[in-house]
Image (cartoon, rainbow, N blue to C red):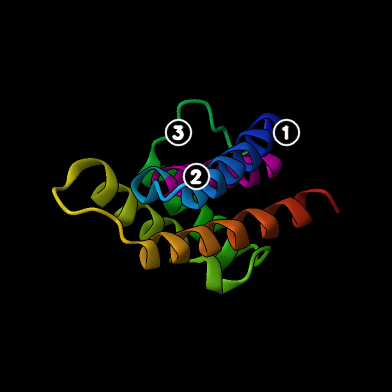
Amino acid sequence: MKNEFLAKATENISAAELLFDNELYNASANRAYYAAFHAAIAALAAIGVETEAISHPAAQSQFNAELIHRRKIYPSRLKSYLSHLQEERNTADYKRDSVSKKVASRQLKKAKDFVETIVQEIEK
């Protein structure tokens, strides 16, 4: 299951980059979040956590608790990434305000860092 979610994560990073390059910042922020979310699921699956139909809050909580704090597999800088990415995705999808180019760029950088860090660890 981890490989399928890693594939989704990398596909979503590519989509976020394309959307950003085409000045579609709301859509880019959405895909950036889902790239990180799918990478988190892959990381949890890699250690044997049941991830079938895992909720967004559960994935964030388990990633931080199990993979950052308890097992110390991933660096602490990733701790806030999922929640920040989700906040901007919520702005992009549900609020009147739009995601700016600056915010979308920051989101894309965070998502790329998150996904690349997880891919490197899983593919060791």
Q: Residue furthest front?
A: 22
| Residue type highlighted by circle 1 | Asn
- Is 71 located above or below residue 54 in the figure? below
In magenta, the rendered stretch is: 28-47
Taking 14 as reference, is 65 left or right?
A: left
Residue at 45% in and 66% down: 106
Which SS does the magenta portion mostly show?
helix
* Disc assigned to residue 21: none
Residue 13, image x, y percentages: 58, 46
CB within 8 Å, label 1 to label 2: no
Question: N-terminal of the two: label 2 or label 3?
Answer: 2
**Residue type at the position of mark 3:** Ile
Residue 22 image offset from top left, x and y in percent: 47, 46
- Identify the residue under disc 3: 54
Q: Is residue 88 left or right of residue 38?
A: left
Residue under numbered circle 1: 3
